[in-house]
Amino acid sequence: MTAEQLLFLAVGAVTLIASILVVTSPRLVHAGLWLILALAGVAVLFVLLENGFLAVVQVAIYIDAIAILIIIVVMLTRAVMRETDPQINRTWVLAGMAALLLFGSLLAIVLQLPAPIRPALLDPESGLDVLGKALVDVNGFILPFEIASVLLVAALIGAIVVARAPMRGD
Amino acid sequence: MVPLTWYLILAAAIFCVGLFGVLARRNAVAIIMGIELMLNAVNLNLLAFWRYQSPADVAGQVFVIIVFAVAAAEAAVGLALIISIYRRRTTVSPEEIDLLKW
């Protein structure tokens, strides 16, 4: 067992435990903080996959923007759900069975996959600049890239319109 | 080196934990947290496949970036909806948001 495997096991265990605590923690602010730990674990796994750029993007977008936004909304809406109330609904047994069933079938598929043991050789030429050029290349991914930017603008405007204070008489 | 299977199993586990959260939590914000976990598991899967199968191809990374953008949009709109519902009906529990149910 190499050092990399040990590191993967440690980070993977932390990520998995943090994500289990996200869905089971009775206090939502704690769940949000566990979510940050789980997202950071995924960022470390991105580094293990030798993609430092996407790890940084993961930290900047997921931890910085999304997780903080979620925690702020938890704090804004905290008054309605008391922590003594059950945080899990009546059909959680069914939900757990569905999740376990999905995990079992995914495991069965993954284990019979002819998966490579070691990663392919990383071409030193295919670095960040290749990715950046491909994103704005007409023959590359400019259409999904622009659609994503339009989607983000639409989501921003939509979020402002939806979340503004209701007008009198609404 | 870490075998690809390990990454796939871990991603599947995180995805199923997120699915459980989406199905079982009573708070809409917690449901969004579950969705974020699921999206993260998918990203991990995509990037692992990119690294082990075709690192010369940028498509895997582009896919992850698009998922990032969609996740940010989804979180913004979803949380705006939750705040709007909270303002109008003082609840964040999907069980009580039954205006469109009959």
Image (cartoon, coloured by chain):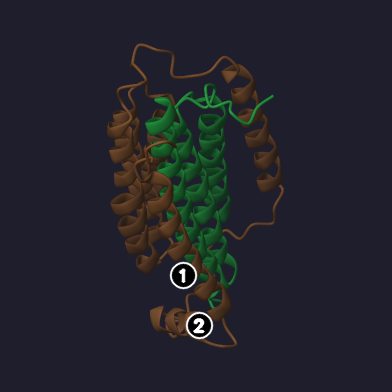
Picture residue at 48% right of the left edge, 34% below the top: B31
* Closest to the observer, B75 or A24: B75
What color does chain B have in the rendering? green
* Closest to the observer, B100 or A78: B100
The quarter of the picture where residue A18 lies is: top left
Chain that bears disc 1: A
Is residue B3 something that shows in the picture? no
Q: Which residue is mark 2?
A: A134
Looking at the image, which residue sits at the far bottom? A138
Given the image, on which type of amino acid does mark 2 rest? Ala
Q: Secondary structure under badge 1? A: helix
Q: Which chain is brown?
A: A
* Mark toward the viewer: 2 or 1: 1
* Closest to the observer, B96 or B22: B96
Left or right for A101, reference A67: right
Given the image, on which type of amino acid does mark 1 rest? Ser
Q: Which residue is mark 1?
A: A149
* Disc 1 residue crowd, few under 14, some 14–19, many 20+, Cα 10 Å: some
Looking at the image, residue A56 lies above or below residue A167 = below
